[in-house]
Image: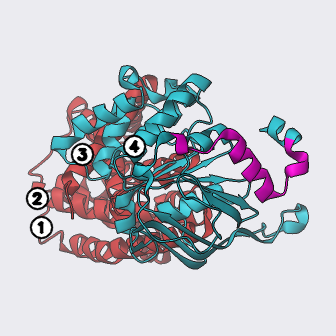
Amino acid sequence: MNAVVFNSVTKRFQHRPALFNWLGRERSGATEALRRVSLHVPKGEALVLLGPNGSGKTTTLKLISTMLIPDEGAVAICGADTLQEGGTVRRKVGFAAANERSFFPRLTARENLDFFAVLEDVTKQERGARVEEKLGLTGLADAGDTLVMKFSSGMYQRLGVARALLKNPEVLLLDEPTRSLDPGSALRFWPFVRELLSGGTTLVLTTHNFQEAAAVADRIVVLRRGEVRSERSFGRGATDTPSTDLPSTDHPRNALPSNCRPSLDEVKAFYFQATGDGEDAPAFETAL
Amino acid sequence: MIRVSLSEKLAAIVRRDVLTTIRYRNGFLLSAVGVLAEVVAFRYMARAIGPSFRPEGVDYFPFLLVGSGFYTFLITGVQAFLSTVQEAQQTGTLEVLLTTATPAPVLIFLSAFSAFAGKLANLVLFLAVGLLLFRVPLLHPNLLGVGLIFVLSLAVVLALGVFAAALQVAVQKGSAVIWLLGSVWFLTGTVFPVSALPLPLRWAAWSIPVTHSLTGMRGALLLGKSTSELAPEILWLSAAALVLIPASLGFFSRVLGRGRREGTLSAY
């Protein structure tokens, strides 16, 4: 069964210049953030979205979470359409957004999680244990009683992951989850994410970090200028797959040995081939 | 499937707002001092005007106390709720809140309710200080009437709060509602009776729900009017609530759909 299905999805953002636009030079028209994107993510798979800035990665996650709705095409999560059955979708999807400040600054980490747990319909009987579990999983148990306004960027990021996990989501969305983590924390974070997947969670993760993609991905999709440029599954029997015709089956990841992860070099080569940035690769990597 | 009751969600939102308020330590204390200063100022203003001025048949100080206290409560409640929405937009919390399992209209209505609950503490302090410190006699107040007028007024301004939030999400200018409410304060009978206005303005005054809130509250609390005597205010406020609550929630839902389509939920 597919956990996430994008069926020829287009998303545009309109620019609405001010009334007296002759005073400035604000652009008009629309930006096409995604163009006829079709994707299928089988249940239990870890899909990593790679792509340059502005390629549509975060827009893809927002469309899954119902923060955005498509202009054309349809997005379905575990069979529920995001437009028609938004409430059902929201019960299934946990989203750790890249915006680190999306908490109540004068509440502690524990109070923040407890508050969001109530809104996520976690019952009173389960709530305390659930919050403690997620604080522990993300390494924030000792910081539970600290006001989040005193958190570092990395702590905010971990708290965001803890919040996304509160409802034990069927689909977990992570938007550049290790962007603000120190290298050691990032190295510990990736096995933690793989561990989550062993429980059957489906993961969609965006990153600019090839090492992260290599550590986590079952499949990588490269986006560029709102279009799927290429996608590739890794592991036993995996091959390059046409972008719109993925098989809709449960993912066999749990049967794969750990050495089936793609290597860092494989990910880099695939990315640069897909984006056509091969000749500029050294400069591009330095920029990353 | 609802696993957490509305009252539990409301309690969580109120707790969040109370914790946030008291952790702005100095702001919390300054706000209390401001309330006291305002009461004292009104007391001496009433004394300066003299005892012969008895609007609507009551002394000027209690007239001012109830009118200004209740008006401030209603308006600052809308303002506090709008600030919550604006802050949530700026931090990105709004988008996250709107992707929780709690439906957006429920969440927004409970948040507005909590904002007013916060201002209720100010109103109670304001009235308590005024009535007790300056020994204003309350002759047979109609507590049922006070409760009815209070609940109906709250329903009306909750709707205005949701409308302001919707305007904030739609065009990032929810403050227009505050400006509008603030600009008509002199019509509402806050510091002088509506009867002092010329006839056309009196008609305008009676079309504003807050005018009926103040008239009803003074009647029930200061004059001890019976519930049947308060019927015009009760009916007017009930009708306004019945129209404004579904209209504001409907407007908010439409704006939310548009925000999700255009990606402007967190634009501010």
Between circles 2 and 3, the one closer to the viewer is 3
Is there CB contact under 8 Å for labels 1 and 2?
Answer: yes
Task: Tell me the magenta residue range.
Answer: A259-281
Horizontal relation, residue A73 to residue A195: left or right: right
Q: Residue at x 37, y 37 (%)?
A: A112
**How far from the left and from the top, in percent, is residue A22?**
90, 67
Foreground of the two, B122 or B117:
B117
Picture layout, residue A146 above or below residue A34: above
Asked if marks 2 and 3 fall on the same chain, the answer is yes
Name which residue type carries label 4: Leu
Cα–Cα span, label 1 and label 4: 62 Å
Cα–Cα span, label 2 and label 4: 56 Å
**How far from the left and from the top, in percent, is residue B97?**
43, 53
Task: List the residue tagged with mark 1.
Answer: B227
**How far from the left and from the top, in percent, is residue B7?**
20, 52
Question: Does residue B180 appear in this view?
Answer: no
Task: List the residue tagged with mark 2.
Answer: B144
Is there CB contact under 8 Å for labels 3 and 1?
Answer: no
> Can residue A271 be found in the magenta stretch?
yes
Q: Tag 1, which secondary structure?
A: loop
Chain B tint in image: red
Q: Residue at x 37, y 73 (%)?
A: B244
Q: Which mark is residue A196?
A: 4
Q: Dot 1 falls on which chain?
A: B
Label 4 Cα neighbours within 10 Å, binned few <14 / some 14-19 / many ≥20: some
Picture layout, residue A196 above or below residue A189: below
Q: Which chain is cyan?
A: A
* Residue that protrudes farthest toward the top in the picture: A142
Name which residue type carries label 2: Leu
Cα–Cα span, label 4 and label 3: 32 Å
